[in-house]
Image: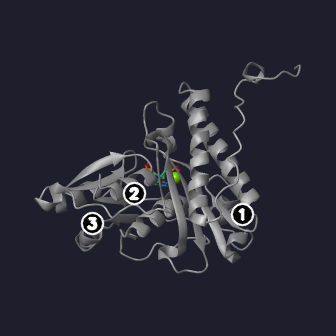
Amino acid sequence: MSEQTGTSARIAGQREPVADGGTPPVIDAAFARWLADRAGQVLLQVRDEVGYADGKALKAAGDKAAHDLLRAELARWRPADAVLSEEDDHSRLAWQDDRHDAVRPDRLDASRVWIIDPLDGTREFSEQGRTDWAVHVALWTADCSRPSCLAAGAVAMPAQHRTLATDQPPAYPPLPLAAATGGPIRIAASRTRPPAFVTALAEDIGAELVPMGSAGVKIAAVINGDADAYVHAGGQYEWDSAAPVAVASATGLHASRIDGTALKYNQADPKLPDLVVCRKDLAPRLLAALQRHLP
Ligand SMILES: Nc1ncnc2c1ncn2[C@@H]1O[C@H](COP(=O)(O)O)[C@@H](OP(=O)(O)O)[C@H]1O
Ligand SMILES: [Mg+2]
């Protein structure tokens, strides 16, 4: 192919180069926001360029583009830090083949680990018109002075034109009028893979379920007061929750496993199959109800 310039010369499927993001903030939390926003812009671009005709191709293109950008910027601006990403094949090996010793990841000895989900809510990303997908960027540190040792986090929701991050923690959600007047508690849950017990749990406490995609978007809904709780069980990984849990914790919300124990990140096995995020006043009631419904 002859060398040309401009969009018309691009090979089919090849994306426009991403604009250089300039020099990022030095403070980790602001850097996390900058990074998540940059990946979010890339994902919007991928949606425009690839289109929705082939959902599988769109998901793959989005995952790769966001992952490549996050990896490149982390290597450039935080070269000494370790990274745990959903899209890294080697991180999967650490638990899938039961060879933890053979593939012990370097991140287990690192003092700073970025836990990233380049595209959370991948299914929703591939569906035209849906805005419930996100980019997650979290920083775990061995210096465990913050809840769950998460020193910083950012959740970009590019299709909703908003980003929540620990550099400017959102205000604690107001008590919704419905709750104050005895209306139903609203529990955000996966629209495609809700926990088996969640309907019985909702009936038990007089709650209504609010289905939506992406763990980050669901936790953002709790932060904003659009939902009172997010309950998940049955499978998930550290990258699905690290960044939104960092923001929720910075905001003052409750975040734990569904049995009430602490959420732990940068573990040898990054499976983190369940969690509950909710207003602090609701936590005792919700955890007690969860005890009654745990499998
Ligand atoms: N049972 C399960 N096992 C593994 N991952 C799960 C899961 N249920 C949800 N997830 C992951 O949690 C994220 C939010 O899911 P949901 O939108 O259904 O609430 C998605 O991340 P990804 O989109 O990054 O894969 C999804 O893959
Ligand atoms: Mg995810």
Residue 54 drawn at (x, y percent): 57, 27
Dot label at residue 78: 1
**Residue 251 occupies which quadrant of the picture?**
bottom left
Dot label at residue 293: 3
Closer to us: 37 or 194: 37
Amino acid residing under circle 3? His
Dot label at residue 129: none
Mark 1 closeness class: few <14, some 14–19, many ≥20 residues within 10 Å: some
**Residue 74 occupies which quadrant of the picture?**
bottom right
Q: Which residue in the protein does label 2 denote?
A: 219
At 14% from the left and 61% from the top, the residue drawn is 180
Residue 227 drawn at (x, y percent): 29, 54
Q: Are marks 1 and 3 in contact (CB under 8 Å)?
A: no
Label 1 – label 3 distance at C-alpha: 43 Å
Amino acid residing under circle 2? Ile
Amino acid residing under circle 1? Arg
Beta carbon of the mark 3 residue lies under 8 A of ligand 1? no
Q: Residue furthest right?
A: 2
For marks 1 and 3, the one nearer the N-term is 1
Image quarter where the N terminus lies is top right
Residue 284 drawn at (x, y percent): 25, 74
Label 2 – label 1 distance at C-alpha: 27 Å
Closer to us: 114 or 86: 114
Q: Are marks 2 and 3 in contact (CB under 8 Å)?
A: no
Label 2 – label 3 distance at C-alpha: 22 Å
Residue 267 appears in view: no
Q: Is residue 286 above or below residue 46?
A: below
Closer to us: 193 or 78: 78
**Residue 112 occupies which quadrant of the picture?**
bottom right
Mark 3 closeness class: few <14, some 14–19, many ≥20 residues within 10 Å: some
For marks 2 and 1, the one nearer the N-term is 1
Nearer the observer: mark 1 or 3; the answer is: 1
